[in-house]
Image (tube, rainbow, N blue to C red):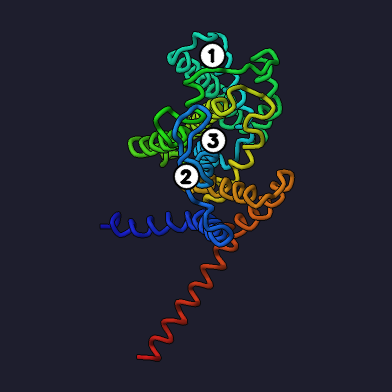
Amino acid sequence: MKKEANAPVRRKSGLAQLLVPLIAIAVLVLFNLIRDPSFFSVAISTNNSGNTVLTGNLVSILNGASELAILSMGMTLVTAACGGQDISVGALAAIAGSVYVKIIAGAGAAASGWIVLLAFLACVLVAMLFGAFNGTLVAVFKIQPMIATLILYTCGRSIAYWINGGATPTISNGVVSAIGSFIPGIPVPTPIFIVIICGIIFALLFRFTTLSLMTQAVGINQRAARLNGINSTGVKLLTFVILGACCAVSGTIAVGRMGLINHETVLSEIEMDAILAVAIGGNALGGGRFKLSGSVLGAYAIQALTTTLYAMKVPSTDIKAYKAIVIILLVALSSPVVKQAMSRLWARIRRGKSVVGKEAA
């Protein structure tokens, strides 16, 4: 009975956590509908490969946010367990992408779907090993996550450069192109399906394992979690390994989009957007309770803002400044101080309504 009584409370808490990203997306949708009613229209066209595909700003938002959405899932786990953020995800994605390209380019024109799969598994393994390196610094050596991952943030793109000998090899492979764009005969961009698959994998992990519970327990109170038999070191290490796998997936999507690997530009500065997606999603950056769907919505909110600014002909050099202003507002709205003030205001409004109701009666 107690469990059933607490269920509505948990549902309300979950909905409240999603309030900020949902409001952000709703405001952007309303603004664009007023500014240009056709902003979200979807059209059918033929791409350069002769395939029938869906086009439009809505498709661009869902497609363009794919790498960020996947990274935000892994970043949410690291944030929840460790109370800090990994700032090396962009560099790690570049390393994974370089390994991916190295294997495929080495096979030449004979690279089949099996070679691409082997290359993907290899880059996932490499990224997970680097993730384990970051996790070891945080979980074993007790280094603050942002400082620990600063090492790979600094040298990661140089490692990606060395992997391919300083070259930027181009890949002409149908499978690789399909991963970053469209599968022939399917009008929806492939990265959108990859995000859905990643979301399903995380949902299954949380459903059939105790990963979510242990991650939150370690983030809320590491000492109490340890006294309850939870290996906090192992949980923290695991979250970094999972984030490494997310980096590899994002790196392969980015390579598929460009058809090459450029260690300097691939997913450049995406780590900042990933952290912001977690914050906008209502997750505490100090660790503890988290909601993966909030981070994903935060990623789409950031991409929707970027697409809106481009549609308004804002120069690319000014976009970061506009994004910063909007993000400051979103983060301020989701801060504990503002939330407490809004809660007090709502309580006073409800008390006022009850008093008016009694007087009317």
| Residue at left offset 69%, top offset 27% | 264
- Disc 2 marks which amino acid? Ala
Q: Residue at x 68, y 55 (%)?
A: 325
In the rendered image, the vertical position of residue 136 relative to residue 106, given as above or below? below
For the point 49% across and 50% down, the residue is 41
- What is the spatial separation of the Cα atoms under label 1 and label 2, in whole angstroms? 34 Å
Q: Nearer the viewer, mark 1 or mark 2?
A: 2
Quadrant containing the C terminus is: bottom left
Which amino acid lies under the numbered mark 3 shown in the image of this protein? Glu
- Could you say whether the residue bearing mark 1 is in a helix, strand or loop? helix
Say whether disc 3 or disc 2 marks the residue closer to the N-terminus.
2
**Does any portion of residue 2 appear in the rendered image?**
yes
Q: Residue at x 57, y 45 (%)?
A: 303
Q: CB of mark 3 within 8 Å of CB of mark 2? A: no
Which element carries disc 2, helix, strand or loop? Answer: strand
* Mark seen at residue 67: 3
Label 1 or label 2, whichever comes before in sequence order: 2
Q: Secondary structure at mark 3?
A: helix
Residue bearing mark 1: 104
Badge 3: few (under 14), some or many (20 or more) residues near its Cα, within 10 Å? many
Q: Amino acid at mark 1?
A: Ile
User: Which residue carries the number 2 mark?
Assistant: 43
* Front position in the image: 74 or 315: 315
Q: Position of residue 198 (x, y in %)?
A: 43, 34
**Residue sitting farthest toward the left:** 1
**Circle 2 crowding by C-alpha within 10 Å: few under 14, some 14–19, many from 20:** few
Q: Is residue 294 left or right of residue 335?
A: left
Q: Give above or below for 144 relative to 114.
A: below
Q: CA distance from mark 3 to mark 1?
A: 21 Å
